[in-house]
Amino acid sequence: MSPPVSPVVSTEALPASADVVVIGGGIIGVSAAWHLARAGVSVALCEKGVIAGEQSSRNWGYCRQQGRDPGEIPLIIESMRQWREMHQALGEDVGFRQTGVHYAAANEAGMKRFEDFMPHARAHGLDTRLLSASEINAALPSPTRTWAGGLITPSDGRAEPALAAPAIARAAMRAGASVLTGCAVRGLERTGGKISAVVTERGSIRTSAVLLSGGAWSSLFARSLGVRLPQLTVRSTVMRTHGGPELTEGGLWTPKFAIRKRLDGGYTIAHGGMSTADITLDSFRFFTDFLPILKDEWKTIRLRIGRKFLDSLSQRGHWALDEPTAFEAMRVLDPTPHASTLAWAWNDLVKSYPAFAGVRIAERWAGYIDTTPDAVPVIDEAAGVPGFFIASGFSGHGFGIGPGAGRLAAELIRSETPCVDPAPFRLRRLAR
């Protein structure tokens, strides 16, 4: 089952107009809405299901700068600034704790990857440091396992996915935003080539600017407008425990398991690298885009063909705006957890830290991660559709970077000087 999410009470009335309409109520969308509303912009956020119902509440909860693509580092630095101020800014505790996140290497090849990140960390002034074998084994002692070394950024931390996006959504509403749940967007109306309205299942909202932050749904919506967004989804499986031994106050990532301390005293646990890719028609549509990363990561991706492939056969790329759409047929993506992936992670965790052997599992869930061919998000205005902006494809890095991404998207929409260089996030970099 999916993790319980802090509820957000929907705005009752559909506004007749808004300066900006945000599509999608994950952490990117609510953060953008919050930044826009605080700047005095009238904004309506439309979510087909519930706020943070999909990957924004199903992720690991890491807020990390280390291990990032170099192009993302300035944006995650901005996000970390916001995370540290979040409790005061929102008036709610979203569970952020500056604890650091340990990365542990099983061998010298793993250490080499950590060493390769250090020039980027130094260039951006991060407090990242390599840990020798003796340092990481002293910090995370195991009676059965010896790590080859590690990596830590003390200014990194953790937060609670089930709390964060809903709290930001409520803050956006207090700042004047309309947040409409159970309100799927079917498409856009254009006049003279420019956006004039967003058509929802409940009626139309006049607007001239739209932000698509639909996560796993973004590519389908963009395609209906003639915009090519090469994006696929991978299924990540996660579980949480009732309590657990005192191992870390933050997170620990290893190639075979990843854990994160929770506010309730338990741990969120997942496999450190394994995920499942459900084959769909998009897998063939974007095959050449994703072939390089598939060649590099084939050992960590399980390809699966099943119900999702059959569903994609009947999924239309275009539809009339006066009829129900795929977005209404599936309010919340709630995929089945992959039991063997969790078993592998759990067995390796217990092997490394036997004190977990008696810990009870509270629940298991899965979510779909929106990925791009280079694992870097798109935050950009789509060419050919003036006023149509995209913030999607966060490739499993979206929770921690969400507040900064929301701010950047809001600044691009308002034609303000952006907080970071947006060049790494341009859509055109993914053009074939």
Image: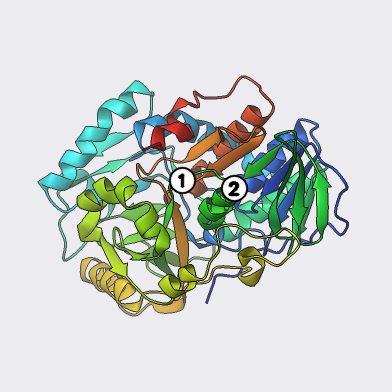
352 sits to left or right of 401: left
Disc with the residue nearer the chain's start (1 vs 2): 1
Say what amino acid the circle numbered 2 marks.
Answer: Ser
Q: Residues within 10 Å of mark 2 (few under 14, many from 20)?
A: many
Name the residue that disc number 2 marks: 213
* Residue 124 vertical position relative to residue 181 in the rendered view, above or below: above
Name the front one of labels 1 and 2: 2
Q: Residues within 10 Å of mark 1 (few under 14, many from 20)?
A: many
Name the residue that disc number 1 marks: 157
For image coordinates 36% across by 74% down, the residue present is 338
Q: Mark 1 falls on what kind of element?
A: strand
Measured as percent of width and height from the top left, residue 380 is found at 55, 33
For image coordinates 72% across by 54% down, the residue present is 46
Outermost top residue: 417
Measured as percent of width and height from the top left, residue 111 is found at 17, 43
7 or 230: which is nearer to us? 230
Quarter holding the C terminus is top left
Say what amino acid the circle numbered 1 marks.
Answer: Gly
